[in-house]
Image (tube, grey):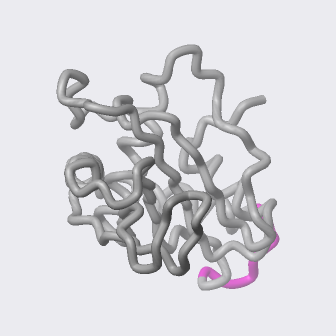
Amino acid sequence: MVAFKTLYKDTIAPELMKSGKYSNVMELPKMQKIVVNMGVGVPGDRDELKSVAGDMAKITGQQPVITLAKKSIAAFRLREEMAIGCKVTLRDVRMYEFMHRLIYVALPRIRDFRGVSANAFDQQGNYTLGLSEQGIFPEINPDSIKRVQGMDICFVTTARNKEEGFELLKLFGMPFAK
């Protein structure tokens, strides 16, 4: 929804300016991108990788990039350049659409949901969220899931610290646990 972009311009930006921490509109923290990453549990399995990439394409509305192993690890039966997962980088309109679907559609579908952790911010104000299954998104048919697959979602912001990033995502409506 482009409504999230207008929400930022019409509501969130003036709210942040009123706080008195910023002297210029260009200093305000904003969303830069969202990176969605899914790993495949069985490295090298082409059918599993196609399934995971298809689910990610349905969820994000964008074709994923296949990620490859950087080095060999014998304990994991992993060879260099072996396909181990996929990722998508969302920007602008698709980023805001995905963020809206995640916050208002997918997260409330989690059983016994009490909010996401507020402790997953890094020093630059970026937030990382881990989901345990892809079935919470309405685009995924539960009957077509062969194997439950988790994913990592990283919200990259232009915030300077944890507090600014937290405030920005809170104003967007991210349901943080109390």
Q: Position of residue 90 (x, y in %)?
A: 36, 67
Q: Position of residue 171 (x, y in %)?
A: 61, 49
The number of numbered discs placed on residues in the rendered structure image is 0
Q: Which residues are magenta?
A: 19-25
Q: Main secondary structure of the magenta part?
A: loop
* Nearest to the observer: residue 140 or residue 28: 140
Residue 14 belongs to the span the image colors magenta: no
* Nearest to the observer: residue 11 or residue 163: 163
Residue 23 belongs to the span the image colors magenta: yes
* Nearest to the observer: residue 52 or residue 69: 69
Examine the rendered structure and indicate whether residue 144 appears above or below residue 30: above
Q: Position of residue 18 (x, y in %)?
A: 72, 63
Q: Residue at x 23, y 34 (%)?
A: 140
Q: Residue at x 72, y 31 (%)?
A: 177
Is residue 145 found left or right of 132 in the rendered image? left
Q: Residue at x 47, y 39 (%)?
A: 103
Is residue 116 found left or right of 105 in the rendered image? right
Is residue 154 found left or right of 89 in the rendered image? right
Split into 4 quadrants, where in the image is the C terminus? top right
Residue furthest top as drawn: 112
Q: Position of residue 113 (x, y in %)?
A: 58, 21
Q: Residue at x 47, y 48 (%)?
A: 151
* Nearest to the observer: residue 108 or residue 52: 52
